């Protein structure tokens, strides 16, 4: 069996690697190839092009990577024509994978969208996008109704992060702090400036300067800065030095990306994206920031005005919960003074932090009841024609939409 995986950023690389491992536990003979990054390559996926550096957020932000994306498509196209897969799994990377899915289906390859275009952003285009997929593997409950109404066969598989992350208790935090060399009773704040180079360049200085302002007022605080990709370490360390966060006597740990650093934290300052969801599942209050180009924000606000988008809410936990539990700072509000003020408000108010933590407990229950990766792998294999998903792995049946709604 041949399976194509197409991912286009760090989060997709992580998810693709986990899916590859789960597929091989079910079918050790499966051959996997496609687009991704070093994590997928380490998981024995034949990666034709490293697309991790090509992930972007926004409209104008994507222009700079178009030549590289075209090269990735050419490499994948040649391989598909020479060695057609039994099924293709399209992981996030919205517009690229929508176009790729359409091309693959015209050549008789079955396609599954995993982490499909987010319905909070793209619901007005769901019917158009649905023609790129034979199936949508929904990770968020809101996706099921939107994609099924758009005509896509939809299965709720849940979110794989909910399989492994649960609220960190006091013992978990202490253990995580010892692993990071931050043992002690003083508060710990995590700063996560993003996983894409343009994100780090745009958000890192404001987040790290905000951290420095907090550190000046609360010198007992320890800091942990997870860096998603090794290539970004020099940039983040330089930003922290320039911001004044690194200073004599101050405890600042730069560590590899991942939820372990969040588990050690009382509070996180985080770029909007998967990291905010990790924080929520771990029960860590967070200040979420989001800033894109003027062109992108203009498109977003026009879409809201035309009713094509519901709101400018950006934090995944807030979208899942349907209310703003985590504070969000967008565009001009992404500045050191406002970020620091929100951080201090949470740091200095244990009751508020506990209230936020309690509300975040609901997120995990909304993302499935465990076994998400197994459901996803079995659904992919069923699309390839080899097996049906097991009955005990099901959370919700496959939904097939008709123009009038669900059937």
Image (cartoon, helix red, strand yellow):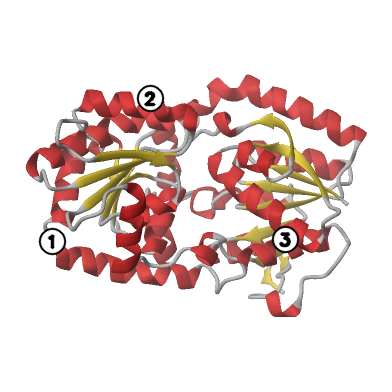
The foreground one among 226 and 307 is 226
Label 2: few (<14), some (14–19) or many (≥20) C-alpha neighbours in 10 Å: some
Residue at (46% x, 63% y) in the render = 165
Q: Is residue 126 left or right of residue 287?
A: right
**Element at badge 2?**
helix
Dot 1 corresponds to which residue? Answer: 349
The foreground one among 164 and 248 is 248
Circle nearer the N terminus (2, 3): 2
Q: Is residue 7 left or right of residue 345?
A: right
Q: Which mark is residue 235?
A: 2
Residue 268 drawn at (x, y percent): 29, 50
Residue at (18% x, 58% y) in the render = 185
Q: Quadrant of residue 363?
A: bottom left
**Element at badge 1?**
loop
Residue at (55% x, 53% y) in the render = 123
Dot 3 corresponds to which residue? Answer: 377
Circle nearer the N terminus (3, 1): 1
Residue 144 in the image: above or below residue 275? below
């Amino acid at each position: 069996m041949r399976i194509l995986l197409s991912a286009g950023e760090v989060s997709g690389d992580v998810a693709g690697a986990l899916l590859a491992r789960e597929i091989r536990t079910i079918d050790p003979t499966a051959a996997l190839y496609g687009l991704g990054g070093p994590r997928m390559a380490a998981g024995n996926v034949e990666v034709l092009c490293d697309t991790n550096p090509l992930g972007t957020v926004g409209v104008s932000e994507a222009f700079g990577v178009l030549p590289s994306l075209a090269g990735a498509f050419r490499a994948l196209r040649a391989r598909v024509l020479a060695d057609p897969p039994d099924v293709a799994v399209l992981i996030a990377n919205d517009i690229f994978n929508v176009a790729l899915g359409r091309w693959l289906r015209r050549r008789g390859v079955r396609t599954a969208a995993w982490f499909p275009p987010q319905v909070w952003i793209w619901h007005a285009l769901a019917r158009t996008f649905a023609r790129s997929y034979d199936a949508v593997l929904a990770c968020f409950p809101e996706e099921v109704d939107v994609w099924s109404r758009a005509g896509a066969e939809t299965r709720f598989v849940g979110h794989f992060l909910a399989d492994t992350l649960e609220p960190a208790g006091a013992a978990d935090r202490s253990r995580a702090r010892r692993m990071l060399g931050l043992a002690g009773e003083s508060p710990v704040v995590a700063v996560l400036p993003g996983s894409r180079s343009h994100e780090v360049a745009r958000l890192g200085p404001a987040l790290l300067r905000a951290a420095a302002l907090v550190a000046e007022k609360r010198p007992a605080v320890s800091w942990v800065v997870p860096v998603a990709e090794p290539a970004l370490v020099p940039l983040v360390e330089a930003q922290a030095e320039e911001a004044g966060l690194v200073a004599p006597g101050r405890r600042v740990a730069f560590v590899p990306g991942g939820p372990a650093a969040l588990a050690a934290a009382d509070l996180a300052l985080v770029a909007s994206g998967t990291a905010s969801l990790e924080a929520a599942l771990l029960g860590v209050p967070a200040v979420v920031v989001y800033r894109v180009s003027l062109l992108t924000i203009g498109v977003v606000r026009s879409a809201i005005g035309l009713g094509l988008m519901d709101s400018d809410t950006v934090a995944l936990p807030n979208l899942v919960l349907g209310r703003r539990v985590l504070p969000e700072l967008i565009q001009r509000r992404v500045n050191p003074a406002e970020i620091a003020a929100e951080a201090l408000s949470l740091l200095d108010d244990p009751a508020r932090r506990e209230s936020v933590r309690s509300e975040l407990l609901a997120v995990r229950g909304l993302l499935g009841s465990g076994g998400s990766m197994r459901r996803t792998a079995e659904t992919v294999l069923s699309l390839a024609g080899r097996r049906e998903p097991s009955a005990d792995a099901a959370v919700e049946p496959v939904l097939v939409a008709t123009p009038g709604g669900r059937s």
